[in-house]
Amino acid sequence: SDEINHLGLPRGSSPPLPHLPLCPSFPPKLEGPLRIEFDWTRTMDDVHKESGPGLQEGGRFQPPDCISQHKVAIIIPFRNRAQHLKHWLYYLHPILKRQQLDYGVYVIHQHGNGTFNRAKLLNVGFVEALKEYAYDCFVFSDVDLVPMNDRNIYRCHDQPRHLSAAMDKFGFRLPYKTYFGGVVSLSREQYMRINGFPNEFWGWGGEDDDMYSRVMYKKMEVSRPDNRVGMYKMVRHARDLHNEENPHNAGKLGLTRLTMDADGINSLRYTLKHVTKHALYTMVTVDLHGPK
Ligand code: BGN
């Protein structure tokens, strides 16, 4: 596309210096287990200070001293969770930098008060991020989840990966074996192979189970970090308005095999409202053409 030059970089950005080495497979500055405390008095100013130098506008980063092996778009479905986003940014930017990723943060904001649609927002994030840069890996993350161990690298693997394998709200283990909610990563190829995510799960529940089924039906496996590395802390919160549990979603799950090739990235329709570059993230506001 027009915005991308021959090096896969956004037009106008300088190419990595040719003498830089590839970043190592094991980033040297990881700390392991982290202390995560959601401090409600934290201001956006604190968040800016914590995120440190090197961030480019829109929440973009490239390691200064090596060429990252991973071009990662982080996609966060969003509406009315400014406080959560603050916590997420506060913790994640320093972690992602230590992980030596070439990354960008995309907050996909559902316009209006219609029923929320998490999976469709994730599809929009995939498309919109690729308009800016040749990302090869996508991490799809809820805004209220912060990893408690920086060895849980926000990159892609040979198989789709479920990063949030041990969330505090489920007692630091999977609530059930096929759980695929919270934070997952898929390479561009893995994502295309499953035709992206379903567009038709409105309201709460089931879209992540559909995502898991897609991976199974396309003969892939889900990889996970162990329960120590995969620990996550969730921001406690009340249930959102306009995201009620949808009883129709359970029924849809039985149909995934039949519907997945027609419902996904190949059938995605939406109206882009605006793209705003903030210092720590890119906000993409989108009308999803919801029901009613
Ligand atoms: C499941 C939900 C998931 C959710 C997990 C954890 C459904 C499908 C209908 C049976 N699945 O029950 O979407 O992530 O709980 O909260 O609702």
Image: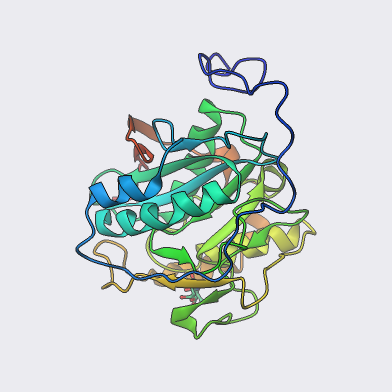
The image shows residue 40 at horizontal and vertical percentages of 22, 66
Q: Position of residue 237 (x, y in %)?
A: 28, 72
Q: Is residue 196 visible?
A: yes
Give me the residue at 47% from left, 35% from top: 60
Return the residue nearer the eye: 240 or 267: 240
Q: Quadrant of the N terminus?
A: top right
Q: Is residue 266 left or right of residue 141?
A: right
Q: Residue at x 23, y 59 (%)?
A: 42
Q: Is residue 163 left or right of residue 143?
A: right
Percent position of residue 84, x then y: 31, 60
Residue at the image point whose x is 61% and y is 35% from the top: 135
Front residue (pair 212, 71): 71
- How is the rendered protein coloured? rainbow
Residue that lies at the very extreme toward the left in this rendered image: 41
Residue 12 lies left or right of residue 48; in this view the side is: right
User: Measured along the vertical axis of the image, is residue 11 above or below residue 270?
Assistant: above
Figure quadrant of residue 227: bottom right
| Position of residue 224 measured from the top left corner of the image (x, y, whole percent) | 68, 68
